[in-house]
Image: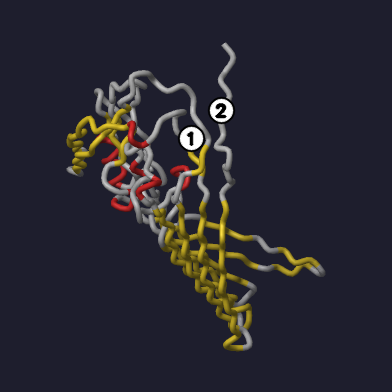
Amino acid sequence: MPSMPQPVQPDHHTSATDEVILGIDQEIARDLTVSVAYTHRNIRNFSFTPPIGVTAGDYSFIGHATGTATASNGFVLTFDVPYYGLSLETPPVGVELRNRPGYRQTYDGAELQLVKRLSHGWMLRASAAWNDWRQHVPPEAIFDPNFRETNLDGDVATPGFARTNSRWQFNVSGSYQLPWGITVAGNFFGREGFPQRYVVEVQTHDVASNAPRILIGRMREHRLQNVYELDLRLEKTFLLGPVHLVPSLDVFNVTNVLGTTNVNYSGFSNVLVRDAEQLADHQRGHR
């Protein structure tokens, strides 16, 4: 059978972004400058694809998914979340592309940067940033109540569940010229861990056989460990007539700290939660 074309809302709009950036740069000495910037961003007209002919009123409360997962290191994740199913007599066929009414996201960020250009044998560049990316969900924007990730008003926004939304980060780099043509340099970077979602998968046994993965708690309740990395360089300049020869030695991630950047899913039974050993790895900070 030919596939059914996907209907599109007649007055559908692409997403729109309004952004304001305010910044100032100031030279506070002949070799030293400081800059401050603030960004506000508002994103609207988000699209979503609900089943054709289905409204928010067609979802009915079924029950609560409850349970506890315990990791080998003692970390405990207890969940008690409601889940819903379609109360229609026949399953919907296909989905429709629509704008999600009233839903929007905002981003606010501030950045401070200090730059000391190379003079008197040394240089420095330091920056720090604060970021806050949130979603705003009025009642009319909630369609499927199982999608808690995008239904919780004021929670952190995670577009496509990508690894985003570290609220702070910093970076410091510099170099110092020693005698005999030797230069030492380094870079130190740090940021807050990304939000880590934990979900429970439920078999609703509704008319569409939906098996939603439902967020446990809120996105901002759990984060991966903070990330720090220190890199160092040592180099020496040799003069061979008109030629400058500069061999260098670089050491990356000097402290050899392995930060967790992602945790995969693993499940069991009809009610699925992240496997206890995965939770243990998250707490121990292993990759």
- From the viewer's perspective, tell me whether residue 119 is left or right of residue 154: right
In the rendered image, the residue lying farthest to the bottom is 29
Residue with the mark numbered 2: 6
Q: How many marks?
A: 2
Q: Which of pointers 1 and 2 lies earlier in the amino acid sequence?
A: 2
Q: CA distance from mark 1 to mark 2?
A: 9 Å
Residue positioned 56% across, 30% down in the render: 7
Q: Quadrant of the N terminus?
A: top right
Residue with the mark numbered 1: 49
- To which quarter of the image does residue 142 belong? top left
Task: Name the one closer to the observer, 45 or 273.
Answer: 45
Residue positioned 60% across, 85% down in the render: 27
At mark 1, the secondary structure is loop
Residue 139 against residue 277 in the figure, above or below? below
- From the viewer's perspective, tell me whether residue 85 is left or right of residue 245: left
Task: Name the one closer to the observer, 208 or 249.
Answer: 208
- To which quarter of the image does residue 235 belong? bottom right
Residue positioned 46% across, 59% down in the render: 106
Residues packed near mark 2 inside 10 Å, few (<14), some (14 to 19) or many (20 plus): few
Q: Amino acid at mark 2?
A: Gln
Where residue 264 sits: x, y (%)?
37, 36
Residue 81 against residue 24 in the figure, above or below? above
Q: Amino acid at mark 1?
A: Thr
Task: Name the one closer to the observer, 44 or 285.
Answer: 44
Residue positioned 46% across, 53% down in the render: 104
Where residue 174 sits: x, y (%)?
55, 71
Residue 69 against residue 14 in the figure, above or below? above
Where residue 33 sits: x, y (%)?
58, 81
In the rendered image, the residue lying farthest to the top is 1
At mark 2, the secondary structure is loop
In the rendered image, the residue lying farthest to the right is 242
